[in-house]
Amino acid sequence: MAGQITVVEGGSVTTPRGFQAGATYAGLKTFAEDKLDLGIIVSEAACSSAGIYTQSSIKSPSVTVTREHINGGSVRAVVVNAGIANCSVGHQGYLDAQEMTALAGKKLGLESNQVAVCSTGVIGVELPMSLIRTGFDQIQIKADGGHELARAMMTTDTRPKEVAVRFEVDGKQAHVGGVTKGSGMIHPNMATMLSFITTDAAVDKDFLDATLREVADSSFNMMTVDGDTSTNDTLLVLSNGQAGNSTINSNSPDAAVFKQALMDVCVHLAREMARDGEGATKLITVEVVGATDVSNARKAARTIASSNLVKSAVAGSDPNWGRIMMAVGRSGAVVEESKIDLFINGVCIMEEGKPVPFHRDAVVALMRGTEITLRLNLNLANGEGTAWGCDLTEEYVIINSAYTT
C-alpha cells in the first residue's frame, strides 16, 4: 500500500539494497571476546549523501575530513572506530583520519574521498594506526554485517541501536535503515552522537540534505542525556537508488512518505539513545502543546527534559511537579502561568496554573515504570514539540568518574 511504512524485523543499515558492512576487534577498546571496535559500511553503487556535524568549537579531525568528503559529493562508504575519539591530538589527528579513509578505500576499491570517517571514545589520545591497519585486513564485508557494525560503534552504550523500515515509492519497495551510538555526552545541539542512515530510494542530494536537517530538528535535536555535546558528533545519510524509483525531490509525490520514513527511523534511534543514557533506568518523554509556535514548544520541552532536578525527581519516582514548572519558566518559551495544564503519565496535576487534587501514591506507582510522560498544555496557540531524556542516577556519576581509568 502506497504511503504505508512498516518496521523490518531485525533490520539494520544493510537492510536497504546494495549496502554491506563488517567489523572487527582491532584493539582500540579493552579486550573482551564479544567486543568490536572498527567497522565499515559501503554501498555497491554511487550515492547521494548529506551530513550534519557537531556545533562544538573543539572538533575531531575525523569530523573535518568527513565534512570535506561529504561536501565533495561522492561518499559511498563510512569507516568508524570506537574507543578513541581522535580529538585534541594536533595535526596528527587530521593525517590519521585521512589515512583511515585511504585504508578503507583501498580495501573497498574506492578513492579515499569516497569514504567518510567517524571516531568515538576518549579525547586526547592518538589513534593507534598500526592496530587499525591490521584491523582493516580482518574486516569481512557482508550483506548482513549491519549488526556487527552497530556493535563496533558502541562505547558506554549497553546495547546496539538500529532499525529499518520499508515503504513504497514510485511503485517500488524501498527501505531506510539506521544505526546510532550514544549513551553519554548527549544534548540537543546537533548531532549529539554518531548515526548513519542508509536508503535504497533514489533521492536528490539537495532534497536529502534539507530533509535530513528538518528531520534532525524533530528527532536527534530533541533528545538529551546529560547536557553535554560531543566533539565528534556526526549524522550521515547515504542514498544509492537501488530501489529503482524515480529520483525523489521536493516536488515529488513521494517526498512526504520518504520524509516520514526518515523521521520514523531517526525518532526511534533518538528515543533509544535517551532510553540507554548512562546509568538510566527510565525514558522521559516531554510533550508540550498549545505553545505560541513550534520553536517555543521545542524550547520548553528540551529544557524540561534536560533539567537535572526533573531528571532526579523521575529517578526517585517523585511527582515533584514544581520542578517542571521551574524548568518551563526558565526555558525562554512564552508562557502564561494561569493557562498551563500539566499531566504526569496521563494524570492531571495542574489545571489553569493551579494544583488539582490527585492520588499521590497512585502517581508514584505510575512513575516507577520505565517510561514517564510529562505533558504540558500551554493553551496559547497550536505549537507542539516533543523531547526525550532519561533519569539521572548515581550510576551516571560512577560511569563518568572512572571513564579513562
Image (cartoon, rainbow, N blue to C red):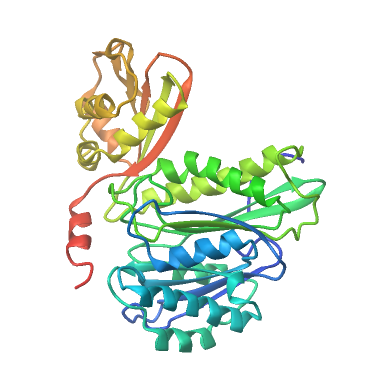
Determine whether, in the image, residue 149 is placed left or right of residue 364.
right
Vertical placement of residue 328 versus 216, above or below: above
Q: Residue at x 46, y 27 (%)?
A: 294
Vertical placement of residue 90 versus 311, above or below: below
Vertical placement of residue 179 versus 43, above or below: above
Picture coordinates of residue 143, whole percent (x, y): 65, 72
In depth, the one of 9 and 262 nearer the eye is: 262
Residue extending furthest front?
A: 91
Determine whether, in the image, residue 72 is placed left or right of residue 334.
right
Picture coordinates of residue 332, whole percent (x, y): 30, 26
Picture coordinates of residue 32, whole percent (x, y): 35, 80
Q: Residue at x 39, y 44 (%)?
A: 223
Vertical placement of residue 386 versus 127, above or below: above
- Give the total number of marks visible in the rendering: 0
Q: Residue 35, can we see it?
A: yes
In depth, the one of 198 and 168 nearer the eye is: 198
Picture coordinates of residue 333, whole percent (x, y): 34, 24
Determine whether, in the image, residue 71 is placed left or right of residue 36.
right
In depth, the one of 109 and 385 nearer the eye is: 109
Q: Quadrant of residue 63?
A: bottom left
Considering the image in quadrants, where does the C terminus appear?
bottom left
